[in-house]
Image (tube, grey):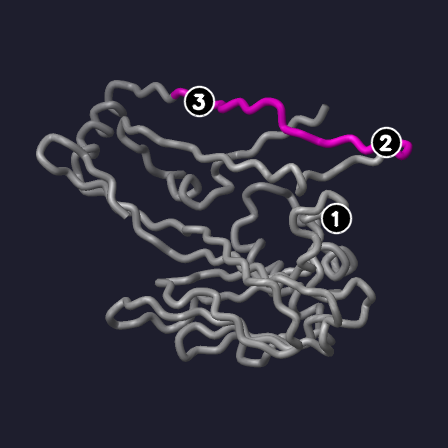
Amino acid sequence: MVQTIIPFNRYSFFESLSDKILPPMQLTFKIELQKDEEMILQNNNTDLRRIVVNKFELWVPELHFTGQGQKLVNENFLKPNPWKYLNETLHISSARRDANGTWLITPGVKNPQHVFVFIQQSRKKNDYRYNPYIFDTFDIDGNGTARLDTCRLQYGTKSLPENPYDNDFKIRILNDLMNFRYRKNDYNTGVQLQLANFVKLYPIIYFDLRNTEKSVTGDPKKLEFHYKLNEVAGAQDYNIFTLVLNEEEFVLKQIGNELVAGF
């Protein structure tokens, strides 16, 4: 039996509420379970045992106000209240086999702040024999021959980083990834990644877009991933996965006697 707690403040929308109080409103949680073919199996003396989730519990603390605190909250409920948070979107490419390419991640996105990219063999999708949570960025064909060699991210006309990431300098790639985590180390006393398991298990490429120039009109810009492999990945197809965190604004507005949420 495995039990774990997932704090909601690990998700940007709830993290942004650390110093705010929402008025009475309905929140809907959408939980998607992995497909059966993607569940991790435990091999116990050659007997395959499927690990499944059999129970969810939502734990919500209740906040009680003092008289003065309740008055302060009531006075601020009917005021327009905007705040920003990071919206998370996962993009997956179609199966690819080219050694040099450009993948249009999205034709338009506004205010991207962080982008994470990794590559995985296509055969690992929907196949219980492979762990879907181990990535193949530096070993695409499974033989140690085909790998990501260089890459850059293009947002509009801006290319990041200024000097492309290179497979020969994995410490640089790892350090940039760790710098994202150190921005606010709320949840753990340390990090689990070090060079060995970064290369073999979780080779994630990170791009920091927080300092890119903002558009005067605020129009969405295309996001592209430019990459080169050291050689063609043979007969092994691969997919590119990209997680984009873009900044959005949540606003509570008063319309008549009601508060309306807008994005």
Which amino acid, mark 3?
Answer: Pro
Q: Give x and y (percent) for residue 216.
A: 26, 72
Query: In percent of the image, x 20 and y 27: which residue is there?
Result: 74
Which numbered disc, 3 or 2, marks the residue that appears first in the sequence?
Answer: 2
Magenta span contains residue 47: yes
Of residue 113 and residue 68, the one placed in the foreground of this image is 113
Q: Quadrant of residue 226?
A: bottom right
Residue pointed to by mark 3: 61
Residue 130 has which mark? 1
Q: Which residues are magenta?
A: 44-62
Q: Report the side of 165 relative to 67 (left or right).
A: right
Q: Give x and y (percent) for residue 221.
A: 36, 70
Q: CA distance from mark 3 to mark 1?
A: 39 Å
In this view, 191 is above or below 25: below
Magenta span contains residue 49: yes
Q: Give x and y (percent) for residue 103.
A: 52, 71
Label 3 element class: loop
Within-10-Å neighbours for mark 2: few <14, some 14–19, many 20+ = few
Q: Give x and y (percent) for residue 153.
A: 52, 72
Q: Report the side of 237 relative to 206 (left or right).
A: right
Which amino acid, mark 2?
Answer: Asp
Of residue 98 and residue 188, the one placed in the foreground of this image is 98
Label 2 element class: strand
In this view, 111 is above or below 185: below
Q: CA distance from mark 3 to mark 2?
A: 41 Å
Which numbered disc, 1 or 2, marks the residue that appears first in the sequence?
Answer: 2
Residue pointed to by mark 2: 47
Which amino acid, mark 1?
Answer: Tyr
